Image (tube, rainbow, N blue to C red):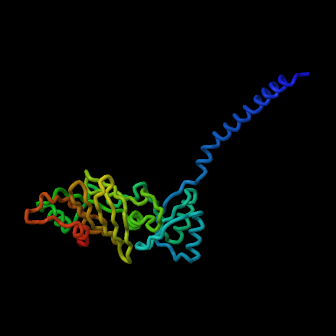
Amino acid sequence: MLSGPRQTKLLAALCARIIRPTLLLGWLIWFSAGPALVQAAPRRVSLIMENLPPPNSATYMAIKKRAGKATGQVLTLTKTEMWSVPAENVEDVKEVAAQHGVGVNKLDAAWNHVLRLSPAELAMTDKQRSMVEQARASKATMGIGIVAAPGAPVVEYALTKDANTPAASKNQAKITVALSERTVLTIARTSVDVKSDMCIWRGTVEGTGAPAVLMWWPGGKMAGTVQHDGRTFSIRHMGGEVHVVVETSEDRMPRDHAPTPQRMRDKSNLRDDP
């Protein structure tokens, strides 16, 4: 018969032998299951839905049912919607949407690039070439950029994403604009005013805090000004999705040309027609 102290030590050693493997096994199970738990959340895909039937119609509900637990945003200016759909439901949505003439377009990784450099082989009309040459002839002009916007629903979504959500993150409120081959800026939204036929978007250039103002119409027209590095970039519509960006410097303005007040910069040339 073991004495009290020896019996206590023996029981403690025995418990340790039992508990340690059990804890190790539990840790191994948790560690191996960890990645699976992280991956449990379904990957989601953002879709632009065009030509949708009325929201209260049976057809609309049938398409929405195929989307599973979809979330989204109504884009009032282009009369479209953005749906965030679990990846495994995308093909089902496309299938039923095609049966009812509904367009489904997947947002690409550059969905918030609202101005992109136009291809070098872009063909311009005589009127468009004349606009470019007139802008180039100005003594204040430092450079010219020919850019294009993506489809109107994509632009509307980029400009208004979560605009009515108080807790919208900074990343959700940023756009990227290519103003020339050497100037591509990220701009953080400070406000957006959606009217019945257009929207006015304001922001600040990332890294400098310089102001930017854009006006956009659902027909694809955009106009505005962006301040950066002592320059003013004026965006003018040239027809379709094509725009010209005129880079100017007040240092090169004629001496009798007083600097333009900021409030006038925000409003000037915003409705230039091609």
Looking at the rendering, which quadrant does residue 10 occupy?
top right
Count every numbered label the image shows and give the total: 0
Location of residue 11 with respect to 249 vertically, above or below:
above
Q: Decide if residue 201 is on the left or right side of residue 257.
A: right
Percent x, y for residue 139?
Answer: 11, 60
Percent x, y for residue 22?
Answer: 74, 35
Location of residue 81 with respect to 121 vertically, above or below:
below
Q: Residue furthest front?
A: 4
Location of residue 114 with respect to 23 vertically, above or below:
below
Whether residue 118 is visible to the viewer of this picture, yes or no, is no
In the depicted view, which residue is nearer to us: 42 or 130?
Answer: 42
Q: Decide if residue 274 is on the left or right side of residue 108.
A: left
Looking at the rendering, which quadrant does residue 220 occupy?
bottom left
Looking at the rendering, which quadrant does residue 198 occupy?
bottom left
In the depicted view, which residue is nearer to us: 266 or 235?
Answer: 266
Residue at the spot 88% in from the left edge and 22% down from the top edge: 2
Position of the N terminus by quadrant: top right
Percent x, y for residue 80?
Answer: 45, 71
Q: Decide if residue 38 is on the left or right side of residue 256.
A: right
Position of the C terminus by quadrant: bottom left
